[in-house]
Image (spheres, grey):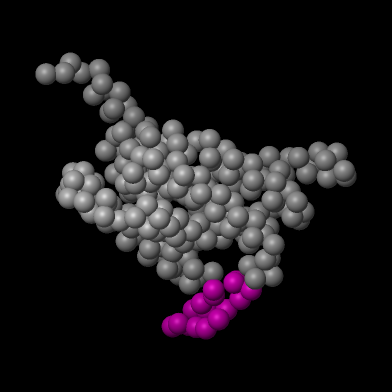
Amino acid sequence: MELLTDPNVWIAFAILTSLEVVLGIDNVIFISVLVAKLPAEMQDKVRRFGLMFAMITRVGLLFSLSWIIGLTEPMFEVMGKAITGRDLVLFFGGLFLLWKASKEIYLQVEVPNHAEESAGTGKIAGKTGAVLFWSSIVQIGILDIVFSLDSVITAVGMVDQIEVMIAAVIVAVAVMMVGAKPIGDFVDRHASVKVLALSFLMMVGMLLIAEAFGAHVPKGYLYSAMGFSLLVELLNLRSRSKQPKH
């Protein structure tokens, strides 16, 4: 009850929840891009499970604070630089994100009818629903762990009470669940926005690799650049919708 009546706790909760939502943007975009390639009847299910997995991952990491702290301890050295467990997770997570985003950009730009052609030739139909579902969940889970590290480290640095951290994570994931479908539908409807989203994921991957080598780049710069690019693209979409159709 003391936590509920302490105004400082509520302020910390509000700030931490906002940060968790912001840090979850890249997660939502990745899930939106991934589920767009799945059959329509499976998309909502994968989206929900992916975000639930994100919540479970973050709460689980909060209960493993000693392990999280251990990730920041040097494991070995490469060319005079101490390498930690966190560096390795960020590095391989960044490589995975770069590979996935660049592959999707290639399919989107060079093979625009890839999804329809695959469905038509039976490549998608030939896979069982369970394989599609779990392969998507595994990919989301890999990125969830990478994205959750920054989220949990931020939470630990801001708040001392684990109850407040868990509550902030749950509320943030609930907000992302509400916004994930509209964002995903919007990205899927506009090919140019999808390429922009994939470019954002590539930048996040490069950011993760840079952090793994000790070069810290505030995410605010990345979000500002992508926000400006998205604003320009929205104006372009608005302009094209106003042009007469021939």
| Residue 96 point in image, percent of width and height | 38, 63
User: Is residue 234 highlighted in magenta?
Assistant: no
For the view shown, which residue lies furthest in the right direction? 2
Residue at image point 64% right, 73% down = 70
Residue 196 at least partly seen = no
Q: Please, is residue 99 above or below residue 240 in the view?
A: below
User: Is residue 77 highlighted in magenta?
Assistant: yes
Q: Nearer the viewer, residue 146 or 35?
A: 35
For the view shown, which residue lies furthest in the left direction? 246
* On-image quarter of the C terminus: top left
The quadrant where residue 94 appears: bottom left
Q: Please, is residue 66 above or below residue 123 in the view?
A: below
Q: Nearer the viewer, residue 228 or 243?
A: 243
Q: Nearer the viewer, residue 134 or 200?
A: 134
Residue at image point 40% right, 44% down = 42
| Residue 241 point in image, percent of width and height | 26, 21
Residue at image point 33% right, 44% down = 39
Q: Please, is residue 101 above or below residue 9 in the view?
A: below
| Residue 229 point in image, percent of width and height | 35, 38
* On-image quarter of the N terminus: top right
Magenta stretch?
A: 69-85
Q: Nearer the viewer, residue 175 or 75?
A: 175
**Would you say 7 lies left or right of 199 here?**
right
Residue 79 at least partly seen = yes
| Residue 192 point in image, percent of width and height | 27, 38
**Would you say 86 lies left or right of 123 here?**
right
